[in-house]
Image (cartoon, grey):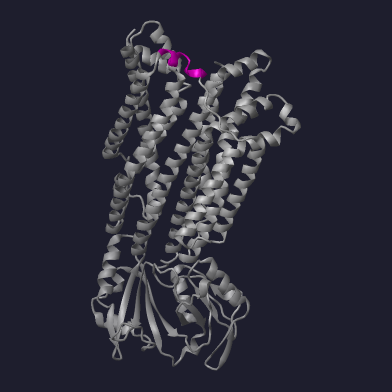
Amino acid sequence: MTSADLALRNVRKSARDYAVYFMTLTFGICIFYVFNSLGSQQAVMDLSSAQSMTMRMLNSVVGSFSLFISVVLCFLIIYANGFLIKRRKKEFGVYLTLGMERERVSRILIWETVFMSLASLVAGLLLGIALAQGMAFVTASLLGVKISGFHFIFSAAAIGKTVVYFGLAFVLNLFFNVRQIGKQQLIDLIYAGRQNETSRAPRPLLAVLFFLLALILLGITYVMAAARLFDSALLLNFMLLVGAAGTFLFFFSLSGFLLAAVQRSKPYLRGLNMFVLRQLSSKINTTFVSMTIVCLMLFVSICALSSGLGMARGIAAELRGSAPYDATLILRAETEDGNERPVFAPGALDPALTRSGGADLTAFAAASRTAVFYDASDTGVVIEGPGGEKPALYLLGLTDYNAALAMQGAAPLVLGPDEYGVNFGSGSAGWDRALTKYCAGGGSLTLGGRDLRTRESLLRRQALEVSTRRNPDLVLVVPDELLAGRQAKKEILFINYSGSSLEYERLCLAALSEIKTASADGVELSGLIETKIQVNDYLGNTTVTIAYLAIYVGVVFLVASATVLAIGQLSEASDNTHRYRLLNKIGADERMLSRALFTQNLICFGAPLLLALAHSAVGIAVAGQITRKIAGIDISGTSAAAALVMTLIYGGYFLATYWSSRNMVVRG
């Protein structure tokens, strides 16, 4: 039998041992291909030039970031493969005892690595190619574009890059495997499974004290984060250091605390609970450093997935709400130094359109309407938002306002006698609370000798221009007759295209560029053109980059964390096979052994995850407060998507680990 035949038979026989290793390779290759094939998705999307540039930039950023990701995945491959080598050292020792040469043992190991690498490479690429088809729809949604003529997406460049990067990782892994077997003495190979790790557990009383200290340190970290007491680099570093120390002490003292807490309870003496707890205590005592690292990696992964996806969704919602029309031309009066002039003649935009000659709106616009905004500085209305913010305040006639709403497909505003409405287009929670309080209190103003009041039902949140500004103008909607004789402060032309083609955008920009600078009554009028496509371009550049980098980092760290835990549990099961068989001989049936294994795996996977979730709950809440205040963006609402990713990957590793360890100790 050749070395290749023997290696293939060994791989088939040890398939259950290779499950976690195969999952790690397949996940890593799949993730790597999907994110490096983003450039090929442009072929199925109707992208503007700016959006095409965004995709090229994203592809470049992800490509550069992939070098770091490949290093992480290479470490995981070597780490996961180390378990297999440890598991099979006795087998290799038997080969040498029977007279097989070390060179042939090395050849067998080489062939096994080649077979597993090829199988995982093919499986990972096939899964990656399948997921890349769905990723195109996700990208199109984030960019706000349509899929045009969808066809099968395939990236030869991404396949080549994946093969090269992982080929190098496999070669490096092969070198470590051969070197590890080559330098081992025969006696070490034969008795590898009986070597125990050194325990560094504190005594039970000290363990309880350390556990309480860990809770105190974590409590200090959470309070500092919630109160946002990290406005300097020194305080931020102190908070992170205290949090890391608390996490370390938590796992360092966990086994002793569990023993002290559970030993005095009746369930401790039932079934195999005593054995399970002792096994857990021994495992945690030797792996508390790796469990600390895993917990912090899970914290980064959860925060990256939740906050990154939430930020992308929040930016998308904020900016999409800032583009209620296909285009707007805003005409403002300016002085020579560029400052906005208080007033100019109302209706200045109409003669400007007439004078331009070439500005034929019917060539691209299905609907258009102008609205005149008036100065409101003499109304005495003062409304402060979060942080004391005061946006620009304007008066707008009810007719113009309802016409603007009609072009959005929104319901008109109805004012009663001596009433006025309030409109603010931002979805910021802080502004919403401030305006609701103002309107519910019946805020009043005096205009044209009439006293007007508002109420909560007259508060609207409609954007009235296309803009990427976070805080739009605050508009007071009043009866038309009260604006007679007042001079305007700005005028807006609203435009909706006849269709969705980029050709209408080109025609619109060409026409409006002719009229964006005009004059009326000797005052220079400066026009600002904003379009929905421009907003979506900005949206895509920000949202897609944040979302994909967050997913990339989050998934890779999640796979890394799950792999480290899985290998640790499989190593534990391999080292303690003889103990489980002894339990079986003294009366423990297969069901009891399976339940004991399940409990061990559940606690070892669950403890770092639960603490990471506690860290993440505080971190995401603080990040949400900061983004709402600074950018007016709500990053909540993505927990379901993050939970789904966590369940599929982390839960998959947990089940694979339990299945593999059960086959080791229960079925031999």
Q: Which of the 4 image quarters holds residue 279?
A: top right
In the picture, residue 220 is in which quadrant? bottom right
Indicate left or right for 631 with 114 as reference.
Answer: right
The answer to whether residue 612 shows anywhere in this view is no
Instruction: Indicate whether residue 258 is drawn in magenta.
Output: no
- Which residue appears at 38% of the width and 50% of the height? 139
- Does residue 485 sit above or below 560 in this rendering? below
For image coordinates 41% across by 13% down, the residue present is 186
Q: Main secondary structure of the magenta part?
A: helix
541 or 240: nearer the viewer? 240
Left or right of 599? Residue 376 is left
Quarter of the image with the N terminus is: top left
Is residue 193 within the magenta segment? yes
Any part of residue 242 in sight: yes
Q: Position of residue 536 (x, y in %)?
A: 36, 60
As displayed, is residue 395 above or below residue 237?
Answer: below
x then y, percent, for residue 520 = 30, 88
Where residue 292 appears, as percent x and y from the top left, is: 52, 40
Locate residue 436, reporting x and y percent.
59, 73
Q: How many marks?
A: 0
Range of magenta residues: 186-194
Q: What residue appears at the point 47 percent right and 55 percent down from the top-left corner? A: 237
